[in-house]
Amino acid sequence: MQSTQVIIIEPRRGWSFPRLGEVWEYRDLLILFVRRDLVARYQQTILGPIWYMAQPILTALLFAVIFNRVAGIQTNGVPPILFYLAGLAGWAYFSQTLTTTVTAFSAHSHMFEKVYFPRLLVPLATILSSLGAWAMQVVTYFIVLMIYWASGTWHQQHFPWETLICLPLLAVYTAVLSLGINLWIISLTMKYRDFTQVFYFIAQLWLYATPVIYPLSQVPTKWRDLFLLNPMAPVIEMYRHILLGAGEIWCEGWAVSILITLGILISGCFMFDRTQKTFVDTI
């Protein structure tokens, strides 16, 4: 007679760290989730991926009219459209992963009751699938930049091509920060449903607390310490430094940002692992 192997899966007690090895074991499922998210975004749409290129341009135009023309916020000699596109290239990926993770997690809720798989795959799939939109927004920036160069409207004396390798590193860093925040969001929203609306409000305010519509150099010195608490502030400035040569390399801000990001990620992992055992009961 052939022996039957029985695997018993039981929730762990107390505080523990997620089993990261399971993510690698279920990598095929992770790829399937990412592929499904990409297909769901672009299937049966008129514009498809083109929308992810048109959206930052329309947003940059709106910012240029409201904040540059009306409010008079200067962009340090850089054309407003390029200034805002460079900032949005970093911010859009971050905000998109935050606002879509909760919805994506709820969409997979019917699977939690039927089959076991690492719940960590859901936020990871959302973050990875959003990289496609991030890449298209970066391409959009370079298309608009080439138009400026071709028309002679604006031209950089020296474009730091050698620093473009840092763009993927910034995307990875943003993904790590997004993952940590997403783990906290999922843990809280699964227990307190109304926290979803509170978070959406916080995400909107976060945009104005980040130097996306204004350069960090225009922030008064007495307020600089508050910006140390925003881990995305040096990231946006680094995008502008790489793409425009106009942003600051804020060493002090980067040091604090890395510490905050690690703290959010580690604590988010512990919080997520402790609460995921009750996800089925709360759904």
Image (spheres, rainbow, N blue to C red):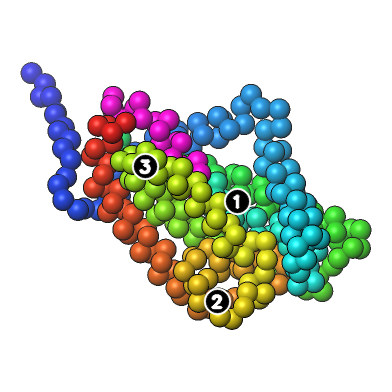
Residue at far left of view: 1
> Which class describes the residues within 10 Å of circle 1: few (<14), some (14-19), or many (20+)?
many
Earlier sequence position, callout 2 versus callout 1: 1
Give 87 or 217, whichever is nearer the viewer.
217
> What residue is drawn where x is 63% and y is 49%?
135
What element does badge 2 sit on?
A: helix
**Do labels 1 and 3 touch, CB within 8 Å?**
no
Name the quarter where the C terminus is drawn. Answer: top left
Name the quarter where the N terminus is drawn. Answer: top left
What element does badge 1 sit on?
A: helix
On residue 224, which mark appears?
A: 2
Magenta stretch, residue numbers: 98-115
Which residue is the site of mark 1?
Answer: 92
Residue 200, position as x, y percentages in the image: 50, 46
Among the 4 quarters of the image, the one containing residue 163: bottom right
Relative height, residue 139 to residue 259 (above, below): above
On residue 132, which mark appears?
A: none
Which residue is the site of mark 3?
Answer: 189
- Name the side, left or right, on which 144 lies relative to 250: right
Residue type at mark 2: give it.
Answer: Arg
Residue type at mark 3: give it.
Answer: Thr
> Which class describes the residues within 10 Å of circle 3: few (<14), some (14-19), or many (20+)?
some
Front of the two marks 1 and 3: 3
Front of the two marks 2 and 1: 2
